[in-house]
Amino acid sequence: MRNVRVRSEVWLFRFFRFSMALLRRMINKLVNRVMLGTVTLPCEKMASDTGLAVSGARKKMVVGLGNPGMNSSRHSVGMAVISALAERLGVAQQWKSDRQVSGEVIVSVYQDTQLVLLRPKLLMNVNGVSVAKAANKFSVQPKNILLVHDELDKALGKLAIKHGGSARGHNGVRSCVDCLQTDVMPRLRIGIGRPSGKTPVDRHVLGRFSKEEQIILNSVLEQSVDLLLTQITEPHLQTSPSGGRRAVGRSKERKPPVQPAEGQSQN
């Protein structure tokens, strides 16, 4: 009798937890839609009809997902990566706050590609609102939007490219999928590892990297930028083998810095 009671309590707890998770997802989806309003998303047909087919094909947007004001947390490692990308491109001083897209934006050029860098200024759960608004403003199709985000299921120091698909439980990616109404966006997943011991996941992802982790993170940022530049110029190239790509132990040879486009200042 006692065993039956225990099993019933376990089942009820699991059902309650599942119901709460489902309710949170529904609320987040509703909030995303309300905040987004009536933004019209760019599509291939619209680009063709307006004569933007050629230029639109050369437009890319790279988004660092995260929480504003928490750029040094594990959950906002995507923002650290996109900041490192701006440094590599020589445009790190050109971030501008854009109220129309609820984020910070840089518009640059890299190898004949018009490149939009975006750091949302909204909470992670509604990052997609900023992404969709920027896609609309700069006429970037979802398939040309590269999301950079943290990944719990990969150890710190591992990277992987994911060519579209489900959000895999990541609230920022799920928000982008909801707001863009598609899951075709490629992603660069940055491993942060799961917490050790009894540390809650929320506390782990919102916490800062330790000094030891920061050493690994420096290599992660460098190689993440390499992967992003490859994806911008060769998006169909498979650059992340099964299990992810290790960002430590790389050779000492470094690529020369990218020269900024004509008319842009060099830092």
Image: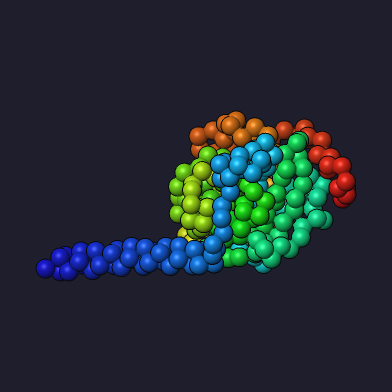
- In screen coordinates, is 140 left or right of 197? right
Q: Residue furthest top?
A: 237
The N terminus - image quarter: bottom left
Q: Residue 32: image x %, image y %? A: 51, 63
- In screen coordinates, is 34 left or right of 228? left
227 above or below 101? above
Q: Residue furthest front?
A: 49
Question: Which residue is depicted at the point 76% across and 60% down?
Answer: 96
The residue closer to the viewer here, 161 or 50, is 50
Question: Which residue is depicted at the point 65% across and 32% down?
Answer: 234
Q: Is residue 222 visible?
A: no
Q: Residue 41: image x %, image y %? A: 56, 52
214 above or below 159? below
The residue closer to the viewer here, 208 or 240, is 240
Question: Which residue is depicted at the point 45% across and 54% down?
Answer: 169
The colour scheme used to paint the residues is rainbow
127 above or below 166? below
Question: Which residue is depicted at the point 20% across and 64% down?
Answer: 7
Q: Quadrant of residue 97?
A: bottom right
The residue closer to the viewer here, 110 or 138, is 138
Q: Residue 27: image x %, image y %? A: 43, 67
88 above or below 15? above
Q: Residue 156: image x %, image y %? A: 58, 48
Q: Quadrant of residue 53?
A: top right
Q: Is residue 50 visible?
A: yes
The residue closer to the viewer here, 47 or 184, is 47
Q: How many numbered circles are shown?
A: 0
